Amino acid sequence: MTSGPLRAGIIGAGRISDLHAIEYLQNPAARLVALCDRDAAQARAKARAWGVPDIAIDDDIDRFLARPDIDLVEILLPHHLHLPVAKKAMAAGKIVSLQKPMCLTLAEADELVAAAEAHDRPVKIFENFIFYPPVLKARALIDEGAIGTPLSIRIKSNPARSATAWKVPAAANAWRQEHDHAGGGPLVFDDGHHKFALAWHFMGDPEEVHAFINWGEGPGGIRFDAQSMISFRFPGNRVGNLEVVYSPEMEMISQYYAQDDRVEITGTRGVIFINGGHGRLAATPPVSLYRDGALTHYDVPSGWEQSFVLSTRDYIEAIGAGRPPLLTPRQGRQVLRFALAAEQSAREGRSIRLSE
């Protein structure tokens, strides 16, 4: 590996790559040097849009991974390709950042964890929501004892419609409708990974999960796994839930996905509210704290892109400092287990104990 800036290559030039590229383009400790996509024309268009038209472009993953001028690869591919491509990247000696969810099954996850822990380079499961500035502020407040011991977490995921949201390519929606490619529904399993990661981040590993996952039609005939409710129980008489509701006639303010995310964490002394994620419901404060009869608002950056920037920045710093990333593959497996338990519960009509 070079002693200069970390040389990064991105595999997958889809919609989300715009956000993954930001920090590599601006961090002096890293440099974006290559981009791989089976649609080379799309990759070249992305490179031009990012202001790096001269970076290497390739449409063959094996040839791309063989390049000696790439230290780190960011893997942004459909879920069913995560395990095979991550293993190829490790075999090629690369540092790896793998898009969530890490795999489709726990058996695949175990295979990836074993490969990663035998690899002599860092491997990260990319998760951005735990680096979202309002989430970081909430975590800091909790660590300071602002609400005492957290007792419950309530997460609301609320897709809607938006005249300002970005356009998602039809192909990106299409593969998410195929179970053998996506592993689960687009809202509870795919986007839900962020929410399960938040619950895990604030409350730890759950003991039991129970889910009602229903299906309806979204925009353009897309099938959505909503309206849905997932409940979870944590050690120490602590609880939580994730509510997924699609509001087709509600207008959402968002420059990204047409979706709002709200979190409420209740403790022994107070309550923290995180308002917004992908989008926002009007001009709500990013973070609010209720304690001792008073409500305090915190104005922190709330652009969703900042969660990608800070997640990537943390990994670059972790590599430089020789510390583990967040999430490690073993931690990513815990979040995947959480999400798969919800899918299993809804499928079998029973609560799933995580010790099963």
Image (cartoon, rainbow, N blue to C red):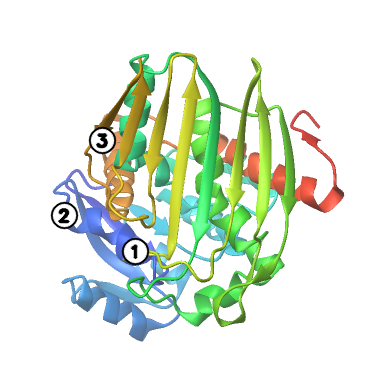
Residue at image coords 46%, 66%: 250
Query: Which residue matches tag 1?
Result: 254
Q: Residue furthest left?
A: 28
Cβ–Cβ under 8 Å for marks 1 and 2 = no
Q: Residue at x 71, y 65 (%)?
A: 215
- Do callouts 3 and 2 mark residues in contact (Cβ within 8 Å)? no
Q: Nearer the viewer, mark 3 or mark 2?
A: 2
Secondary structure category for the residue under label 1: loop
Q: How many residues crowd around disc 2 within 10 Å: few (fewer than 14), some, or many (20 or more)? A: few
Eye-nearest disc, 1 or 3: 1
- Residue at the outermost front position: 293
Q: Earlier in the sequence, mark 3 or mark 2?
A: 2
CA–CA distance in space, label 1 to label 3:
35 Å
Whether residue 65 is situated above or below residue 58 in the rendered picture: above
Q: Position of residue 13 (x, y in %)?
A: 38, 72
**Residue denoted by label 2:** 26
Check disc 1 and give the amino acid type. Ser
Q: Residues within 10 Å of mark 3 (few under 14, many from 20)?
A: few
Classify mark 3: helix, strand or loop. helix
**Residue 254 in the image, given as x and y percentages of width and height:** 34, 63
Q: Is residue 270 left or right of residue 173?
A: left
Seen in the picture, residue 85 relative to 130 is either above or below; the reply is below
Q: Is residue 8 above or below residue 274?
A: below
Amino acid of disc 2:
Gln
